[in-house]
Every structure is written in C-alpha cells, then in structure tokens.
Amino acid sequence: MKYEVRLIPAAQKDFKELDGREKLLIAKKLKQVASNPFTGVALGKRAGIDLSGYYKLYADKKRLRIVYRCVGEEVVVEIVAIGPRENLKVYQEAEKRK
C-alpha cells in the first residue's frame, strides 16, 4: 500500500536547498516512507526538545535527517524538516514547525 507523503512549506524549502546528490538520497528515503510510514525511528523528548509522535529517518550515511509525523486515520506522512544533525538543528527546526 502506498501512503501520501507531503512536505510542509518549510520542508520544501529545506529540500530545495540540498545539492543534487542529497536530493536523490532524500527522495529515495521519501519513497521508502511512502511504502511504510513506520519505518523511521520514533522520537520523543530529548535535550529539551519535545518531538513525541514524530519519527526520523537517516540519509547520506546518517549525515542528514528527515523528521516526519503520520497524520490522520488514512495515514498521510507529513515531512516537517530535512537537514543535518549538527547541534540538533534539524530537531530544533522540527519543534518550531509543530
């Protein structure tokens, strides 16, 4: 079964800022999520950031993160943030975009 994957406007901007190789790697992961939205690792509260109900996926040998959540009963996968893990920046951005 395929699920709908949507990037919120801020995540669309994140995606556009990636280089071509990174875009391909992220696109591959988004296809994976479309097939199984629960393939990612569940997030919770950590380092003062509350992302309970959100998941993360790694790309580019764990250099990039995709933060997403499942929305609704029909399961729409909503991509909230894409970016590097450095200093928890991608998680901080995801929390702001909740």
Image (cartoon, helix red, strand yellow):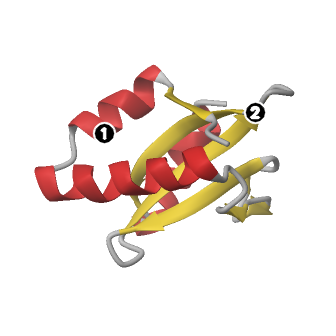
Residue drawn at x 42%, y 75% is 62
Q: Which residue is mark 1?
A: 15
Q: Quadrant of the N terminus?
A: top right
Marker disc for residue 6: none
Crowding at dot 1, Cα within 10 Å, few <14 / some 14-19 / many 20+, comes out as some
| Left or right for 77, reference 80 | right
As drawn, the residue found furthest toward the front would be 1
| Left or right for 80, reference 69 | left
Label 2 sits on what residue type? Val
Whole-angstrom CA distance, mark 2 to mark 1, is: 22 Å
Residue drawn at x 46%, y 60% is 65
Which quarter of the figure has residue 5?
Answer: top right
Marker disc for residue 75: 2
Residue drawn at x 44%, y 56% is 29
Which quarter of the figure has residue 47?
Answer: bottom right
Residue 64: % across, % down? 38, 63
Label 1 sits on what residue type? Phe
Q: Is residue 16 above or below residue 25?
A: above
Crowding at dot 2, Cα within 10 Å, few <14 / some 14-19 / many 20+, comes out as some
For label 2, the SS is: loop
| Left or right for 45, reference 96 | right
Q: Is residue 84 above or below residue 5?
A: below
Q: Is residue 98 above or below residue 23?
A: above
As drawn, the residue found furthest toward the bottom would be 61
Q: Of marks 2 and 1, which one's residue comes earlier in the chain?
A: 1
Residue 74: % across, % down? 80, 27
Q: Nearer the viewer, residue 85 or 28?
A: 28
Q: Quadrant of the C terminus?
A: top right
